[in-house]
Amino acid sequence: MSEQAVVVRDLEKVFTRRKGLQRRRRSALKGVSFEIERGECVAILGQNGSGKSTLVRLLSTLLLPDGGTAEIFGYDVFKEARAVRRLVNRVSVEASFFKKMSASENLSYAARFYGMTPRQTSAQIPEILGRVGFPPDRRGEAMENLSRGMQQKVALARALLTSPVLLLLDEPTTGLDPRSKQEVQSFVREIRARHDSTILLCTHDMKEAEELADRIGLLDKGELLFLETAAEVKARFGVETIEEAFFAATGRSYEDERTEEDEEREVFA
Amino acid sequence: MSSADFSVSKRRVFRDELIGLYGVVERNLYLTKRYFLWDLAFLLWTIANTLTIVFISRGVDISAAQRNELATKLLVGGVIWAFLGIIFEIVTETVAWERWEGTIEYTFMAPVSRPVHLIGMGVYAVLYGLVRAAAIFVAVVAFIGIHLPHANYGAAVALLAIASISFIGVGMMTAVLPLISPEKGTQLGFVAQGLMLVVSGVYYPVSVLPSWMQWIAKISPATYALRGNRDQILHGAGLRFSDVWPLLVIGALSIPIGLLVFRAGERYAKQHGKLKRSG
């Protein structure tokens, strides 16, 4: 019997924002349910403001839900947050580092919070930076002097350094040049091949989702419309591409302009 | 679905927490190293600021001995203001700093407990604050030529260390403010620091304050730190129980209250999505 890494049931998140005297409520997630098996890579597609980042933040214990449940390897994400945090790490669209500190210093800081001693990090940080293709002579350089692609490599190294069994990738290649994007995608493939990692990849890049994931889900305005293999998705809608499936499922083109409500949801999420 | 595969022993958790605490101190050392020139400039500014206050004693028409005493009292006030300011700044900016750098979500999703995280910030703040306070003290004494023949420096440092427990506790309460209000929170922390010093007799005896402020002074740890430090530097007093016990009581209450307040603030931030970088 396969082991479930993630079980999400009827997950809901509502954000409230004041605009003058008015309070506006926007549902970022509306009763989302899905499961991910151990070792599986699942991609969640969706436009900006669809609820992808909210989902990742909920699973990262950074948000509390307004309804529903989520379990990671049997631990309740919201009641057993500390146990969950040992198992999860994340790479987001923003690399997010102390800009004046070097790659090695930033990685040391992150690793200490996961119980790694200076002796362990002095051996493992050079090794993991080498694996992501980070030049050894730039390990001591301040992060602010590194390119966006280079910073994202360090972000991947930070996530992998703590050996997470669930890796949450929230648009890890957005804004990268084609070469850096390809390098990050290759590394994700390598993680899948070499580690006991389950991956939840949130992206708006359909090609990336199809190439990297076992199953593809579509999150639209906070609702998960489907979560199936690419072949099943295409067969379900009788189409050739995932983009056509998006159109068939939502009645909109993937590049359609978003409404004001979508923009607000993006700000909240 | 079983979670047993990933369970860890309490001993392992304790070990990891200690490493996490070390990590917070280590990171702050890295940042101090990287911002060394900025820190040096800030130190020089604080020394200049303290000099402007201590020089007031030189313009008062009193005897040389009284002038020396007044200068010492003002100096102790200035040094404690600087010490307390650094503790408040570092602990209060636990959130604000990480939000500005963009690392806040990674820190808050890490498996280290919040008390260890905050205490780590407090430990670094006290160590850094003591070094800085000593530098200010030495620089001003040398510049103005204050005579301190009876000063009991050991007792003064010990009392400051004891007072630091309370300062960290109060700092934890104010550290929550940037979580609740990303835009105004840090400034509100500085307001709290200023209010504490106003009621604690930073450059004047508490007895000159209105009676309601004197009542508040009794629950301010800075009152006892200032009173004790002045007697230790001027008259060579030791570590007096009358100064120590209020600080221990306030410390024993302020740390758990600070942690509870922070926990409530963190819960609010997670409920309303305030942890993210842009707030």
Image (cartoon, rainbow, N blue to C red):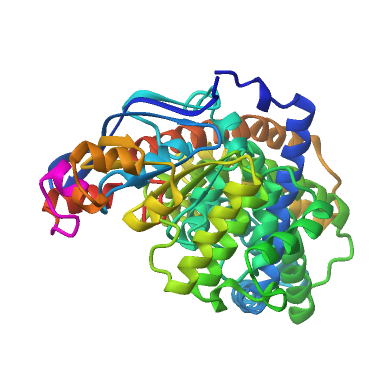
In front of the other: A177 or B276: A177
Q: Position of residue B156 (x, y in %)?
A: 80, 53
Give above or below for B149 relative to A191: below
A246 lies left or right of A107: left
Q: Position of residue B197 (x, y in %)?
A: 55, 52
Q: Is residue B109 visible?
A: yes
A246 magenta-colored: yes
Give above or below for A239 relative to B242: below
Q: Quadrant of the N terminus of chain A?
A: top right
Q: Residue at x 14, y 44 (%)?
A: A248
B197 lies left or right of B264: right
In front of the other: A147 or B206: A147
Q: Residue at x 65, y 79 (%)?
A: B37
What span is colored magenta in the figure? A245-257
In front of the other: A230 or B225: A230
B135 magenta-colored: no
In front of the other: B21 or B250: B21
All told, the count of numbered labels is 0
Give above or below for A14 relative to B158: above
Give the image quarter of residue B133: bottom right
Q: Is residue B129 visible?
A: no
Give above or below for A134 relative to B14: below
Q: Position of residue A200 (x, y in %)?
A: 45, 43
B16 lies left or right of B210: right
Q: Position of residue B23 (x, y in %)?
A: 71, 51
Give the image quarter of residue A143: bottom right
Q: Residue at x 64, y 34 (%)?
A: B250
Q: Residue at x 38, y 68 (%)?
A: A175
